[in-house]
């Protein structure tokens, strides 16, 4: 395996993490706000659905973090 391949994989994992954070963090914050403020308007609010979406968004972000962490560790193991 060439030295550039692990570096490329790490760079790609970090970019994926950046994209996931950029997409998921606003959704996570928005979901938490909806849950916090949702009690005021029960007509179109489903707490269970909001919690499920919040959990899914957080899991997507955690998966991207785990992938970046694994690539960092793999790069250190090659040195």
Image (spheres, rainbow, N blue to C red):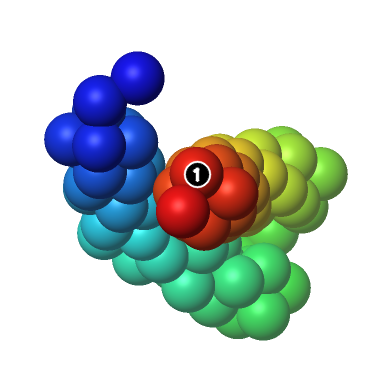
Q: Secondary structure at mark 1?
A: helix
In screen coordinates, is 31 left or right of 11? right
Point out the image quarter for the N terminus. top left
Residue 75 visible in the current orientation: yes
**Residue at (25% x, 37% y) in the render:** 3
**Residue at (67% x, 68% y) in the render:** 35
Instruction: Tell me the quarter of the picture where residue 67 sits.
Output: top right
Q: Residue furthest top?
A: 1
Give 53 or 72, whichever is nearer the viewer.
72
In screen coordinates, is 33 left or right of 24? right
Q: Position of residue 9 (x, y in %)?
A: 31, 34
**Number of marks:** 1
In screen coordinates, is 46 left or right of 44? right
Q: Position of residue 66 (x, y in %)?
A: 62, 48
Q: Which residue is tagged 1? A: 78
Give 68 or 55, whichever is nearer the viewer.
68
**Residue at (18% x, 35% y) in the render:** 4
Q: Position of residue 71 (x, y in %)?
A: 48, 44
Give 38 or 17, whichever is nearer the viewer.
17
**Is 63 above or below relative to 28?**
above
**Is 22 above or below relative to 75?**
below
Residue 27 visible in the current orientation: no
In screen coordinates, is 23 left or right of 68? left
Q: Residue furthest right?
A: 48
**Circle 1 residues within 10 Å: few <14, some 14–19, many ≥20:** few
Give 36 or 75, whichever is nearer the viewer.
75
**Is 1 above or below relative to 50?**
above
Q: Position of residue 37 (x, y in %)?
A: 60, 79
């Amino acid at each position: 395996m060439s030295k550039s391949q692990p570096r490329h994989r790490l760079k790609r994992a970090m970019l994926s993490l950046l994209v996931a954070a950029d997409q998921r963090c606003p959704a996570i914050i928005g979901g938490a706000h909806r849950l916090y403020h949702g009690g005021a308007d029960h007509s179109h609010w489903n707490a269970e659905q909001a919690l499920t979406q919040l959990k899914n968004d957080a899991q997507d972000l955690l998966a991207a973090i785990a992938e970046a962490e694994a690539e960092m560790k793999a790069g250190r193991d090659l040195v």
